[in-house]
Image (tube, rainbow, N blue to C red):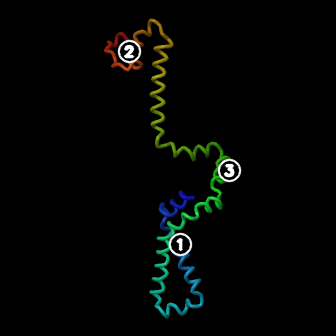
Amino acid sequence: AELLWRRVLTGPNKAIFERLVTAEVQRAVDEEVGVLKALLPATIGTETYKALKAHLARAFIMEFPACVKACYAYCEEAMDTETLLRTRLSEMPSADFEGVLHPIFQQDEWKLIAIGGLLGCIVGICQTVFVFQSDHCESLGAAFGWLITSSSPPSMPPSQL
């Protein structure tokens, strides 16, 4: 609930939320004034009445983030987000589920591919050197043995490889 409210209060649609709240606060003021609504603008002036409603809406918007923290537990219980997500994600076809997860990993996808390629290369070299040890692999073992021993690479003419 906290992340949801943070997104509503500070996210890209913050202006829409503020317009909705402003309209609702102004409607509530008009409703509370009741029968005096016709007399109040005449008494204090129409512009003052509009400014008062705008001020009350701004004050509400300023104070709301501090007050909303008290309702996190209620929001979680009322929305039951965890159960809703679990149910909807389990009902989702695997292709759609992959579509949901793919953007999360997409920014690091190149790292996964690069590391996988590097590890595959190292395993292939180690397999060639240690599993298939024979006379024709000795020069290859000498050439790539430095990977395992952490010493510097040997200087070997290409003809020996």
The amino acid marked with disc number 3 is Thr
Q: Is residue 62 shown above or below 141?
A: below
Q: Which residue is mark 2?
A: 143
| Residue 33, image quadrant | bottom right
In the displayed structure image, the side of residue 98 where residue 119 appears, left or right: left
Q: Residue 87 — which label?
A: 3
The N terminus sits in image quarter: bottom right
CA gap between label 1 and label 2 equals 72 Å
Q: Which residue is mark 1?
A: 21
* Mark 1 surroundings within 10 Å by alpha-carbon count, few (fewer than 14), some (14 through 19), many (20 or more): some
The C terminus sits in image quarter: top left
* Dot placed on the residue nearer the N-terminal end, 3 or 2: 3
* Dot placed on the residue nearer the N-terminal end, 1 or 3: 1
Q: Position of residue 71 (x, y in %)?
A: 58, 64
Q: Position of residue 73 (x, y in %)?
A: 60, 60
Residue ranking furthest to the front: 70
Q: Residue 159 — which label?
A: none
Q: Is residue 108 shown above or below 62?
A: above
In the displayed structure image, the side of residue 28 where residue 121 appears, left or right: left
Name the residue rendered at 45%, 28% in the picture.
118
Q: Secondary structure at mark 3?
A: helix
Name the residue rendered at 49%, 93% in the picture.
43
